[in-house]
Image: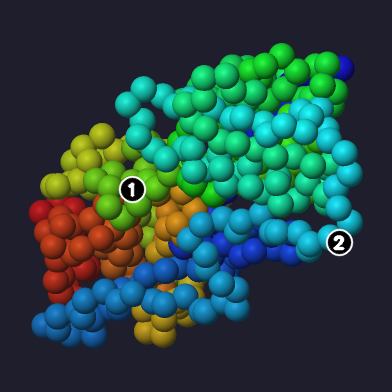
Amino acid sequence: MRGVSVFVVLLVVLAGCTAPLSPTEDGRTTTTATPTTAEGQTPATATAEPTTTAQDTPPAPTTATPAPTTTPEPTTPAPTPEPTPTTTPASGFGPWGSDPVVIAVEVPEGDDREYASLVSEAAAFWEANDARYLGYEIDYEVDADARNPDLVVRFSDDIPECSGQADAAGCAPYITDRRQIDRPETVYVRTGFGDRSTAEVIEHELGHTLGLDHDDEPAELMNATSILYTLPRTNATDKAFPWDDSSFTVYVNDTGAADTDAARDQVRNALDYYTDGAPGMPDNVTFTYVSDPDEAEVRISFAETSPCVRGAASCAAASGYDPDGDGALETYGGLRIVLVDLDTDAVGWHVGYWFAHYLGAEDDEDKPDPFRNATYSERRSEWWNE
């Protein structure tokens, strides 16, 4: 029976700031969580409070180094592991017969990426492992401009709906018998993925043209879903606005605050400062306060001791998305702010400082004036009205 088979995309989502990707036993990648606090996130950066004299100038905020992990941190997904060579030779030939299968390559107009080399990489995988996984010999000849190919690997920004799946990364005919073949057959591969992920999609789809289904070995390759990474994207720290939108939901856990009502007022004053149009910051920011922390993008909590570095008066960390798998977030999806044993009057300043930081003003000189070299008394003033 002739059919088509789909390869669905599953992009990795990182929880925490630069959580490492760790290879598992099957060669895939997964996220490794950093140590967590009660709010569920280890803050990555911290500020110190100046001493209690009004004349003192606070030291510059410091960056905390997360505890080291015992796992490596690759910048690209781990490649499909090469199987152990077998001494049993492949016997006979599959549906394509004994002649080399000629593969042509079609690319979007104006796209000068070296797709043919990725097709060659995928073809070489099956040639090297035909005995182990196919039980017969396969020989490919990749000729990007072949006039009479047996197969065409067509790269496109969008691929046709495949077996009812609209967001597939690839699509290919499922061929088990030579009578099914109508040359040239076409394999579709979506563009926009990194080299290793693109080669993996091609390998998967070629597997279907060789008679393998989603339940067949190699299971890590032929599975219907996989973690795939995009081409490099701009990191959040290099974006003018690193969030998907400017409407934020906020949860305040006032447990541990010296004066809960006053602390909540401080938080509102700080966030209203951005709603009213903080200098140099986005002017369309809005906040909605929620009672369920699971519904909040911004979570603010209080603690007696610092979960980041000793002596820090506040800490913050973002969580978000790393679609290109480089270990750095490309878009923020959540922010955690922890306030450490603070005077109530200083709560608003620390909340405002961290919000500016994660709105794209990582350097203090890019933050609004109230957050540049503020003294002890200035941090405890009504700076949002000045």
- Residue 204: x and y in percent read 68, 38
Residue 32 vertical placement versus 181 (above, below): below
Residue type, numbered disc 1 = Thr
Residue 213 vertical placement versus 22 (above, below): above
Question: Is residue 338 visible to us here?
Answer: no
Residue furthest to the front in view is: 99
Q: State the quadrant of the C terminus.
A: bottom left
Q: Considering depth in this image, is 45 or 107 the residue closer to the camera?
A: 107
Residue 55 horizontal side relative to residue 245, left or right:
left
- Residue 165: x and y in percent read 67, 22
Residue 274 horizontal side relative to residue 335, left or right:
left
Tell me the residue at 13%/47% (across/down).
279
Q: Which residue corresponds to mark 2?
A: 87
Q: State the quadrant of the N terminus.
A: top right
Residue type, numbered disc 2 = Thr
**Mark 1 surroundings within 10 Å by alpha-carbon count, few (fewer than 14), some (14 through 19), many (20 or more):** few
Q: Which residue corresponds to mark 1?
A: 234
